Image: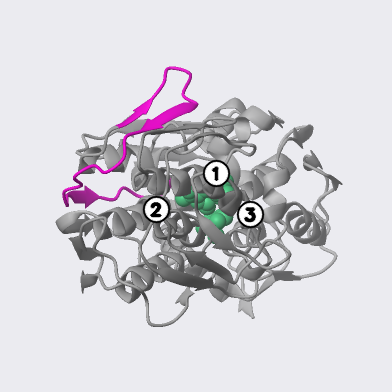
Amino acid sequence: MFKLPKSGLHGKLLLPGDKSISHRALLIGAISNGPTVIKHFLRSNDCLSTLQAIKDLGINVEQHNTDIIVHGKGIKGLQQAAKPLDMGNSGTTTRLIMGLLAGQAFASELIGDASLQKRPMRRVSEPLTMMGAKIQTTDDGTLPVKITGQALHGAKIKLQIASAQVKSALILAALQADSPSTIIEKLPTRDHTEQMLRKFGANIQTAQDQLTISVEPHPELEGQTVNVPGDISSAAFFLVAATIIPNSDITLCNVNINKTRTGILNALLKMGANIQVTELESQGEPAADIRVRYAHLFPIKISEEDIPAIIDELPLIALLAACADGQSTITGAQELRFKETDRIATVAQELRKLGIQLKELPDGLIIEGQTAWNVTDPVLDSHGDHRIGMMMAIAALRSTDDLFLNEPEAVSVSYPEFFTDLNSLLKTRKEV
Ligand SMILES: O=C(O)C1=C[C@@H](OP(=O)(O)O)[C@@H](O)[C@H](O)C1
Ligand SMILES: C=C(OP(=O)(O)O)C(=O)O
């Protein structure tokens, strides 16, 4: 159990690399010709699952701390793995690799940890079947998944849920099909796969509606250098911490500000947060330094069309709402129930321990702001979910009680240095 610190935040922080971009750089590097150099790669457990998977598929990888060189062998260069591929805790690895392996000339099996074994995989296997894929899940639609690689055909597929993982799996399969494919999203989701594949030489068009994606098969993908910007989903914990802890003033450096990811900035600004974004020159995805200071907060309404750009930050929105001046609502977020934990349930359960009043909806939460935080249980729990653990560590900074966190090590899934970085921002304040 970990005793949680209390203080305001000051100083500067360089965020670790973006998780979504790190996964994609490994996978796309593996199926490209020649070396791909990944700079500022995120060495978290989830990305290391992807790294191990491509090694198991016969790809040589050089590792120099956060610089990685992937020696890609082209789209037909992967080899059958000698054993089931272990996806660990990573939904992104699993779903993207399902699309990649569906069109290969060999069979694969995917396994994962207890949390990942509960997560739905038919959302990927069913649309892939429309391209001719042969994928078997358990009767519950979960891992282990068996993929018998097939010759795939192009298809027009309309997605039923807004998911970048599902979209990316279909794009990776469509690259291997016998004719062009069209994928139509329900709502625009993060577009790192499309952006990166274009950079590597693929012909992928996104229509003006931002929903319709056309994929030409069999591109000549050439290895590239990928500069991974800082992860806005990791920066979000400190954006929120500095906003809710009086006297805080921090600058988060080199944070990715891809518009499909900046829902947290938009929400903070709507709530009255004190944020300055200074865009940096960048050779890859856009990045910025973000200064944030303590502010008085107003309530917010988050609804379905807002969700994709803020999906992983919704637990933090619940915390912000608890500090705001009135009642906030999150709706249209049923996808939260299919993450590492059911994040509607775990957010409600954990924030209630601090005395925060909230109501669970099937697809979201109603949160009462500025109710007295009367701690009813000082032992908080990550439930093995990195984002819940980090959100509760930030919530604990607002409470005057001594609080503890169970399973703090879950943070390593996306942010192994989280507590070190948090402590550095707290220590800086003492020196001021
Ligand atoms: O494509 C990605 O890298 C991700 C997409 C999102 O999942 P969904 O596609 O299930 O919304 C997000 O929650 C996850 O952390 C990363
Ligand atoms: C949902 C997440 O990741 P994944 O789906 O890759 O497990 C996350 O990082 O919050």
Residue 64 visible in the picture: no
Mark 1–mark 3 distance (CA, rounded to whole Å): 12 Å
Could you tell whether 372 is left or right of 386 in the image?
right
Mark 1–mark 2 distance (CA, rounded to whole Å): 12 Å
Query: Looking at the image, is mark 1 or mark 3 nearer the viewer?
Result: 1
The stretch of residues the image draws in magenta is 204-232
Residue 41 quadrant: bottom left
Query: Looking at the image, is mark 3 or mark 2 nearer the viewer?
Result: 2
Screen quadrant of the C terminus: bottom left
Could you tell whether 46 is left or right of 7 in the image?
left
Rendered residue at 73%/66% (across/down):
139
Identify the residue position indicated by label 2 in the image. Answer: 151
Classified by dominant secondary structure, the portion drawn in magenta counts as: loop
Identify the residue position indicated by label 3 in the image. Answer: 122
Q: Hey, which residue is sitting farthest top in the picture? A: 208
Residue 184 visible in the picture: yes
Q: Earlier in the sequence, mark 3 or mark 2?
A: 3
